[in-house]
Image: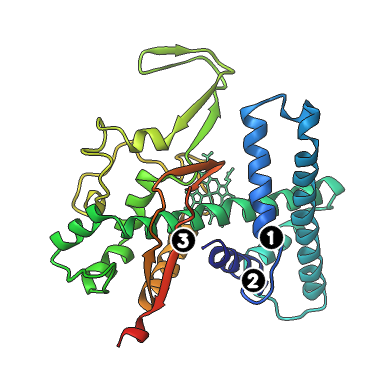
Amino acid sequence: MNVCCLLDNSQVAFGVDLDLLKTSTPFPKAIETCLKGMVYSIEDIFFQFNPKNRPFIKEVREACRLLRTTGAQWIHERKTAMENGDDVPKDILTQIIKSAGQEDSMTKEDEEFMLDNFVTFFIAGQETTANQLAFCIMELQNKTFTINLIKYGSAFQDCCSLTYTFIHLFTSLQVLKETLRIYPTAPGTSRELPEDMVISGIHIPGGCICIFSSYATGRMEKFFKDPLTFDPDRFHPDAPKPYYCYYPFSLGPRSCLGQNFAQMEAKVVMAKLLQRFDFTLVPGQTFDILDTGTLRPKSGVVCTVSHRNDKK
Ligand code: HEM
Protein backbone atom coordinates (compact mmCIF):
# COMPACT_ATOMS: atom_id res chain seq x y z
CA MET A 1 0.00 0.00 0.00
CA ASN A 2 2.87 2.34 0.83
CA VAL A 3 4.40 1.68 -2.56
CA CYS A 4 1.04 2.25 -4.36
CA CYS A 5 0.47 5.58 -2.63
CA LEU A 6 4.05 6.72 -3.00
CA LEU A 7 3.95 5.95 -6.72
CA ASP A 8 0.66 7.76 -7.03
CA ASN A 9 1.78 10.86 -5.10
CA SER A 10 5.12 11.22 -6.83
CA GLN A 11 3.55 10.72 -10.25
CA VAL A 12 0.51 12.98 -9.76
CA ALA A 13 2.14 15.74 -7.74
CA PHE A 14 5.68 15.80 -9.10
CA GLY A 15 5.49 13.99 -12.43
CA VAL A 16 8.19 11.57 -11.31
CA ASP A 17 8.00 7.84 -11.87
CA LEU A 18 9.82 6.31 -8.91
CA ASP A 19 9.73 2.86 -10.50
CA LEU A 20 9.38 1.40 -7.02
CA LEU A 21 8.01 -1.91 -8.17
CA LYS A 22 11.13 -2.73 -10.16
CA THR A 23 13.90 -1.23 -8.08
CA SER A 24 14.17 -0.88 -4.34
CA THR A 25 14.42 2.72 -3.16
CA PRO A 26 15.12 4.11 0.30
CA PHE A 27 12.10 6.46 0.08
CA PRO A 28 9.41 4.60 2.09
CA LYS A 29 11.95 3.84 4.83
CA ALA A 30 13.11 7.49 4.92
CA ILE A 31 9.52 8.70 5.36
CA GLU A 32 8.94 6.18 8.16
CA THR A 33 12.16 7.23 9.91
CA CYS A 34 11.26 10.95 9.73
CA LEU A 35 7.83 10.23 11.22
CA LYS A 36 9.34 8.17 14.03
CA GLY A 37 11.79 10.96 14.80
CA MET A 38 8.89 13.41 15.02
CA VAL A 39 6.92 11.17 17.40
CA TYR A 40 9.85 10.43 19.70
CA SER A 41 10.72 14.12 20.02
CA ILE A 42 7.07 15.02 20.77
CA GLU A 43 6.75 12.25 23.36
CA ASP A 44 10.01 13.17 25.11
CA ILE A 45 11.34 16.73 24.86
CA PHE A 46 14.75 15.58 26.11
CA PHE A 47 15.00 12.83 23.49
CA GLN A 48 17.69 14.60 21.47
CA PHE A 49 19.87 15.20 24.55
CA ASN A 50 20.10 11.54 25.54
CA PRO A 51 23.46 10.19 24.25
CA LYS A 52 22.02 6.73 23.71
CA ASN A 53 19.65 8.18 21.06
CA ARG A 54 22.47 9.60 18.94
CA PRO A 55 22.61 6.74 16.38
CA PHE A 56 18.87 7.06 15.77
CA ILE A 57 19.06 10.86 15.53
CA LYS A 58 21.80 10.44 12.92
CA GLU A 59 19.50 8.09 10.99
CA VAL A 60 16.66 10.66 11.10
CA ARG A 61 18.99 13.42 9.87
CA GLU A 62 20.11 11.24 6.97
CA ALA A 63 16.50 10.42 6.10
CA CYS A 64 15.55 14.14 6.11
CA ARG A 65 18.60 14.92 3.99
CA LEU A 66 17.60 12.27 1.45
CA LEU A 67 14.10 13.73 1.10
CA ARG A 68 15.41 17.28 0.85
CA THR A 69 18.16 16.53 -1.69
CA THR A 70 15.68 14.58 -3.80
CA GLY A 71 13.25 17.51 -3.59
CA ALA A 72 15.98 19.96 -4.59
CA GLN A 73 16.96 17.77 -7.54
CA TRP A 74 13.36 17.42 -8.81
CA ILE A 75 12.75 21.16 -8.44
CA HIS A 76 15.98 21.96 -10.29
CA GLU A 77 15.18 19.57 -13.16
CA ARG A 78 11.67 20.97 -13.56
CA LYS A 79 12.89 24.58 -13.39
CA THR A 80 15.46 23.90 -16.11
CA ALA A 81 12.80 22.24 -18.30
CA MET A 82 10.49 25.25 -17.82
CA GLU A 83 13.28 27.70 -18.64
CA ASN A 84 14.06 25.74 -21.81
CA GLY A 85 10.39 25.95 -22.84
CA ASP A 86 9.94 22.16 -22.70
CA ASP A 87 6.50 20.62 -22.22
CA VAL A 88 6.00 20.09 -18.48
CA PRO A 89 3.09 18.44 -16.67
CA LYS A 90 0.48 20.74 -15.08
CA ASP A 91 1.11 19.26 -11.66
CA ILE A 92 1.77 20.57 -8.15
CA LEU A 93 5.50 20.94 -8.73
CA THR A 94 4.92 23.25 -11.72
CA GLN A 95 2.49 25.30 -9.61
CA ILE A 96 4.99 25.62 -6.74
CA ILE A 97 7.70 26.84 -9.12
CA LYS A 98 5.35 29.24 -10.95
CA SER A 99 4.17 30.77 -7.65
CA ALA A 100 7.77 31.16 -6.51
CA GLY A 101 8.58 32.85 -9.85
CA GLN A 102 5.99 35.54 -9.10
CA GLU A 103 8.03 36.62 -6.10
CA ASP A 104 10.37 39.56 -6.78
CA SER A 105 13.38 37.60 -5.63
CA MET A 106 13.96 34.14 -4.21
CA THR A 107 16.13 34.16 -1.11
CA LYS A 108 17.94 31.10 0.23
CA GLU A 109 15.32 31.05 2.99
CA ASP A 110 12.48 30.95 0.41
CA GLU A 111 14.14 28.00 -1.29
CA GLU A 112 14.46 26.19 2.04
CA PHE A 113 10.77 26.92 2.66
CA MET A 114 9.88 25.42 -0.71
CA LEU A 115 11.80 22.29 0.24
CA ASP A 116 10.02 22.18 3.61
CA ASN A 117 6.71 22.16 1.73
CA PHE A 118 7.96 19.41 -0.54
CA VAL A 119 8.88 17.20 2.44
CA THR A 120 5.60 17.95 4.26
CA PHE A 121 3.65 17.05 1.16
CA PHE A 122 5.56 13.82 0.72
CA ILE A 123 5.30 12.71 4.34
CA ALA A 124 1.72 13.89 4.95
CA GLY A 125 0.46 12.44 1.74
CA GLN A 126 1.77 8.93 1.69
CA GLU A 127 1.68 7.08 5.02
CA THR A 128 -1.79 8.32 5.96
CA THR A 129 -3.53 7.08 2.82
CA ALA A 130 -1.50 3.87 2.64
CA ASN A 131 -2.39 2.99 6.22
CA GLN A 132 -6.05 3.85 5.64
CA LEU A 133 -6.14 1.32 2.78
CA ALA A 134 -4.35 -1.30 4.88
CA PHE A 135 -6.90 -0.89 7.70
CA CYS A 136 -9.68 -1.08 5.14
CA ILE A 137 -8.41 -4.41 3.76
CA MET A 138 -8.04 -5.63 7.35
CA GLU A 139 -11.69 -4.79 8.05
CA LEU A 140 -12.81 -6.53 4.85
CA GLN A 141 -11.81 -9.74 6.57
CA ASN A 142 -13.82 -8.90 9.63
CA LYS A 143 -16.92 -11.00 10.17
CA THR A 144 -19.06 -8.15 11.48
CA PHE A 145 -18.43 -6.25 8.30
CA THR A 146 -19.34 -9.28 6.19
CA ILE A 147 -22.65 -9.52 8.02
CA ASN A 148 -23.29 -5.85 7.33
CA LEU A 149 -22.71 -6.39 3.65
CA ILE A 150 -25.16 -9.27 3.57
CA LYS A 151 -27.66 -6.80 5.01
CA TYR A 152 -27.22 -4.80 1.81
CA GLY A 153 -28.36 -7.86 -0.14
CA SER A 154 -24.97 -8.37 -1.69
CA ALA A 155 -23.81 -11.83 -2.67
CA PHE A 156 -20.74 -11.34 -0.54
CA GLN A 157 -19.07 -14.73 -0.40
CA ASP A 158 -15.41 -15.54 0.10
CA CYS A 159 -13.90 -12.27 1.25
CA CYS A 160 -15.18 -9.94 -1.47
CA SER A 161 -17.11 -10.89 -4.56
CA LEU A 162 -17.70 -7.70 -6.42
CA THR A 163 -21.36 -6.87 -6.61
CA TYR A 164 -22.61 -3.48 -7.67
CA THR A 165 -23.59 -2.75 -4.05
CA PHE A 166 -20.11 -3.48 -2.88
CA ILE A 167 -18.42 -1.25 -5.46
CA HIS A 168 -20.99 1.43 -4.73
CA LEU A 169 -20.09 1.33 -1.05
CA PHE A 170 -16.54 2.18 -1.96
CA THR A 171 -17.20 4.75 -4.61
CA SER A 172 -19.62 6.56 -2.32
CA LEU A 173 -16.77 6.64 0.19
CA GLN A 174 -18.92 5.05 2.92
CA VAL A 175 -16.43 2.27 3.60
CA LEU A 176 -13.43 4.58 3.47
CA LYS A 177 -15.04 7.12 5.78
CA GLU A 178 -15.98 4.41 8.27
CA THR A 179 -12.39 3.10 8.12
CA LEU A 180 -11.11 6.54 9.15
CA ARG A 181 -13.65 6.75 11.99
CA ILE A 182 -12.27 3.67 13.76
CA TYR A 183 -8.74 4.04 12.42
CA PRO A 184 -7.98 7.75 11.93
CA THR A 185 -4.51 7.31 10.47
CA ALA A 186 -3.55 10.82 11.62
CA PRO A 187 -5.06 10.28 15.08
CA GLY A 188 -5.22 13.86 16.29
CA THR A 189 -4.08 17.39 16.02
CA SER A 190 -3.32 20.37 18.26
CA ARG A 191 -3.92 24.11 18.34
CA GLU A 192 -2.31 26.82 20.45
CA LEU A 193 -4.90 29.19 21.91
CA PRO A 194 -3.97 32.80 21.08
CA GLU A 195 -6.02 34.12 24.03
CA ASP A 196 -8.08 32.96 27.01
CA MET A 197 -11.12 30.93 26.00
CA VAL A 198 -14.01 29.13 27.64
CA ILE A 199 -14.68 25.76 26.03
CA SER A 200 -17.66 23.73 27.31
CA GLY A 201 -17.66 25.84 30.49
CA ILE A 202 -13.96 25.26 31.15
CA HIS A 203 -11.67 28.30 31.24
CA ILE A 204 -8.45 27.72 29.28
CA PRO A 205 -5.68 30.35 29.48
CA GLY A 206 -4.23 31.78 26.27
CA GLY A 207 -0.94 30.20 25.20
CA CYS A 208 -2.09 26.68 26.16
CA ILE A 209 -1.91 23.94 23.58
CA CYS A 210 -5.11 21.93 23.16
CA ILE A 211 -4.88 18.44 21.74
CA PHE A 212 -7.83 16.93 19.87
CA SER A 213 -8.06 13.18 19.40
CA SER A 214 -10.18 12.04 16.48
CA TYR A 215 -9.26 8.50 17.56
CA ALA A 216 -11.03 9.02 20.91
CA THR A 217 -14.11 10.85 19.61
CA GLY A 218 -14.56 8.34 16.78
CA ARG A 219 -14.84 5.55 19.34
CA MET A 220 -17.15 7.22 21.87
CA GLU A 221 -20.61 5.73 22.44
CA LYS A 222 -21.79 9.28 23.10
CA PHE A 223 -21.26 10.13 19.43
CA PHE A 224 -21.47 6.80 17.60
CA LYS A 225 -23.85 4.01 18.62
CA ASP A 226 -22.02 0.72 19.11
CA PRO A 227 -18.75 2.47 18.19
CA LEU A 228 -16.52 -0.56 17.71
CA THR A 229 -18.75 -2.08 15.04
CA PHE A 230 -17.59 -1.34 11.52
CA ASP A 231 -20.72 -0.11 9.82
CA PRO A 232 -20.43 1.96 6.61
CA ASP A 233 -24.17 2.75 6.90
CA ARG A 234 -23.25 5.46 9.40
CA PHE A 235 -22.08 7.46 6.39
CA HIS A 236 -25.07 6.72 4.18
CA PRO A 237 -26.08 9.97 2.43
CA ASP A 238 -29.44 9.88 4.29
CA ALA A 239 -27.88 9.24 7.73
CA PRO A 240 -27.51 12.24 10.08
CA LYS A 241 -24.10 13.90 9.65
CA PRO A 242 -21.67 13.55 12.57
CA TYR A 243 -21.47 16.92 14.33
CA TYR A 244 -17.91 18.02 15.26
CA CYS A 245 -17.03 14.52 16.45
CA TYR A 246 -15.62 13.12 13.19
CA TYR A 247 -12.55 14.96 11.92
CA PRO A 248 -9.91 12.57 10.51
CA PHE A 249 -8.64 15.42 8.31
CA SER A 250 -9.04 17.99 11.07
CA LEU A 251 -11.29 21.04 10.68
CA GLY A 252 -10.90 24.72 9.91
CA PRO A 253 -8.45 26.72 7.81
CA ARG A 254 -5.39 24.55 8.60
CA SER A 255 -7.13 21.23 7.99
CA CYS A 256 -5.60 18.66 5.66
CA LEU A 257 -4.59 20.21 2.37
CA GLY A 258 -4.74 16.86 0.61
CA GLN A 259 -8.15 15.69 1.85
CA ASN A 260 -9.89 15.58 -1.54
CA PHE A 261 -6.86 14.19 -3.28
CA ALA A 262 -6.45 11.53 -0.55
CA GLN A 263 -10.01 10.30 -0.82
CA MET A 264 -9.94 10.21 -4.60
CA GLU A 265 -6.65 8.32 -4.46
CA ALA A 266 -8.00 5.84 -1.87
CA LYS A 267 -11.10 5.21 -3.97
CA VAL A 268 -9.17 4.62 -7.20
CA VAL A 269 -6.45 2.42 -5.65
CA MET A 270 -9.01 0.34 -3.72
CA ALA A 271 -11.35 -0.11 -6.69
CA LYS A 272 -8.46 -1.12 -8.97
CA LEU A 273 -7.07 -3.59 -6.44
CA LEU A 274 -10.42 -5.20 -5.58
CA GLN A 275 -11.40 -5.51 -9.22
CA ARG A 276 -8.29 -7.54 -9.88
CA PHE A 277 -7.38 -9.36 -6.67
CA ASP A 278 -8.78 -11.30 -3.72
CA PHE A 279 -7.09 -10.66 -0.39
CA THR A 280 -7.06 -13.30 2.32
CA LEU A 281 -5.50 -12.42 5.64
CA VAL A 282 -2.73 -14.78 6.69
CA PRO A 283 -3.98 -16.29 10.00
CA GLY A 284 -2.49 -15.42 13.37
CA GLN A 285 -2.40 -11.65 12.95
CA THR A 286 -3.85 -9.25 15.46
CA PHE A 287 -6.23 -6.40 14.68
CA ASP A 288 -4.13 -4.19 16.98
CA ILE A 289 -2.91 -0.73 16.12
CA LEU A 290 0.64 0.62 16.18
CA ASP A 291 1.20 4.33 16.78
CA THR A 292 4.20 5.54 14.80
CA GLY A 293 3.00 9.11 14.43
CA THR A 294 0.46 7.82 12.01
CA LEU A 295 -1.61 4.80 13.05
CA ARG A 296 -0.88 1.57 11.21
CA PRO A 297 -2.00 -2.06 11.58
CA LYS A 298 0.39 -3.71 14.03
CA SER A 299 0.61 -7.01 12.18
CA GLY A 300 1.05 -5.36 8.80
CA VAL A 301 -2.07 -6.96 7.21
CA VAL A 302 -0.07 -9.72 5.56
CA CYS A 303 -2.34 -11.23 2.92
CA THR A 304 -2.35 -13.98 0.37
CA VAL A 305 -3.20 -12.24 -2.87
CA SER A 306 -4.76 -14.14 -5.76
CA HIS A 307 -5.78 -12.81 -9.15
CA ARG A 308 -9.53 -12.95 -9.76
CA ASN A 309 -9.05 -14.32 -13.29
CA ASP A 310 -7.26 -17.38 -11.87
CA LYS A 311 -10.53 -18.52 -10.26
CA LYS A 312 -12.50 -18.60 -13.52
C1 HEM B 1 -6.10 9.35 4.67
C2 HEM B 1 -5.26 10.30 4.34
C3 HEM B 1 -4.96 11.54 5.12
C4 HEM B 1 -5.32 11.88 6.40
C5 HEM B 1 -6.13 11.06 7.41
C6 HEM B 1 -4.75 13.19 6.66
C7 HEM B 1 -4.91 13.90 7.85
C8 HEM B 1 -4.34 15.12 8.11
C9 HEM B 1 -4.45 15.84 9.37
C10 HEM B 1 -5.23 15.36 10.59
C11 HEM B 1 -3.73 16.98 9.23
C12 HEM B 1 -3.49 18.01 10.33
C13 HEM B 1 -4.33 19.20 10.10
C14 HEM B 1 -4.42 20.02 11.35
O1 HEM B 1 -3.49 20.04 12.15
O2 HEM B 1 -5.45 20.66 11.51
C15 HEM B 1 -3.16 17.01 7.89
C16 HEM B 1 -2.37 18.02 7.38
C17 HEM B 1 -1.86 18.05 6.11
N1 HEM B 1 -2.05 17.11 5.12
FE1 HEM B 1 -3.14 15.42 5.29
N2 HEM B 1 -4.06 13.61 5.55
C18 HEM B 1 -4.17 12.64 4.58
C19 HEM B 1 -3.64 12.66 3.29
C20 HEM B 1 -2.94 13.71 2.76
C21 HEM B 1 -2.46 13.77 1.39
C22 HEM B 1 -2.67 12.68 0.35
C23 HEM B 1 -1.79 14.95 1.27
C24 HEM B 1 -1.07 15.52 0.08
C25 HEM B 1 -1.05 14.97 -1.08
C26 HEM B 1 -1.85 15.63 2.54
C27 HEM B 1 -1.29 16.85 2.79
C28 HEM B 1 -1.36 17.50 3.99
C29 HEM B 1 -0.69 18.77 4.26
C30 HEM B 1 0.19 19.54 3.28
C31 HEM B 1 -1.02 19.12 5.58
C32 HEM B 1 -0.58 20.38 6.34
C33 HEM B 1 -1.67 21.43 6.17
C34 HEM B 1 -1.36 22.73 6.88
O3 HEM B 1 -0.55 22.74 7.80
O4 HEM B 1 -1.96 23.76 6.51
N3 HEM B 1 -2.57 14.86 3.43
N4 HEM B 1 -3.55 15.86 7.23
Which residue is the site of mark 3? 302
Question: Secondary structure beneath disc 1?
Answer: helix
Q: Which residue is mark 2?
A: 20
- Residue found at x 81% / y 53%: 104
Name the residue at 77% across, 61% down.
70
> Callout 1: 10 Å neighbours few (<14), some, many (20+)?
some
Marks 2 and 3 close (CB-CB < 8 Å):
no
**CA–CA distance in space, label 1 to label 3:** 21 Å
- Mark closer to the chain start, 2 or 1: 2
Residue extending farthest front: 284
Name the quadrant containing residue 237. bottom left
Q: Quadrant of the C terminus?
A: bottom left
Which of these two is toward me, 239 or 165?
165
Residue 253, percent from left and from top: 51, 41
Q: Amino acid at mark 1?
A: Phe
176 relative position to 227: left or right:
right
Q: Earlier in the sequence, mark 1 or mark 3?
A: 1
Position in image of residue 301 (x %, y %): 45, 57
Q: Say above or below: 66 vs 157.
A: above
The residue lying toward the viewer, choosing from 260 and 104, is 260
CB atoms of marks 2 and 1 within 8 Å: yes
Around disc 3, counting alpha carbons within 10 Å, would you say few (fewer than 14), some (14 to 19), or many (20 or more)? some
Residue highlighted by disc 1: 27
Task: Please tell me which residue is depicted at 27% across the width and 74% down the height of the picture.
Answer: 162
| CA gap, disc 2 and disc 3 | 19 Å
